[in-house]
Image (cartoon, grey):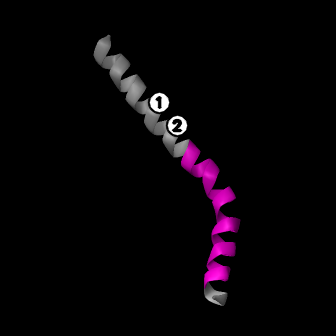
Amino acid sequence: SIRLRGSLNYTKHTMPSLAPVLREILVGLLSGTVTRAGDRLM
C-alpha cells in the first residue's frame, strides 16, 4: 500500500508539469491538421 500511495503522489506531482506539454502537443496537432486542410482547400 505504501508503494501505491507513493505512485499516486508521484503522478499527482508530475501531472501539473505534464499538462502544459500535452496541451501544446494537442494544439500543435490541431493547428497542423487545420492548416493542412486549409492548404488542401486553397
- Which residues fall within the magenta stretch? 4-23
Numbered mark located on residue 31 in the image: 1
Relative depth, front residue between 2 and 22: 2
Q: Residue 19, image x and y in percent?
A: 62, 52
| Callout 2 crowding tier (Cα within 10 Å): few <14, some 14–19, many ≥20 | few
Looking at the image, is 10 positioned above or below residue 30?
below
Main SS type for the magenta part?
Answer: helix
Q: Is residue 22 above or below residue 1?
A: above
Q: Name the quarter where the N terminus is drawn.
A: bottom right
**Residue 22 part of the magenta segment:** yes
Position of residue 12 measured from the top left corner of the image (x, y, whole percent): 68, 66
Q: Which image quadrant for residue 24?
A: top right
Q: CA distance from mark 2 to mark 1?
A: 6 Å
Which residue lies at the image location 32% right of the left edge and 10% below the top edge?
42
Kind of residue indicated by mark 1: Ser
Q: Which mark is residue 27?
A: 2
Secondary structure beneath dot 2 equals helix
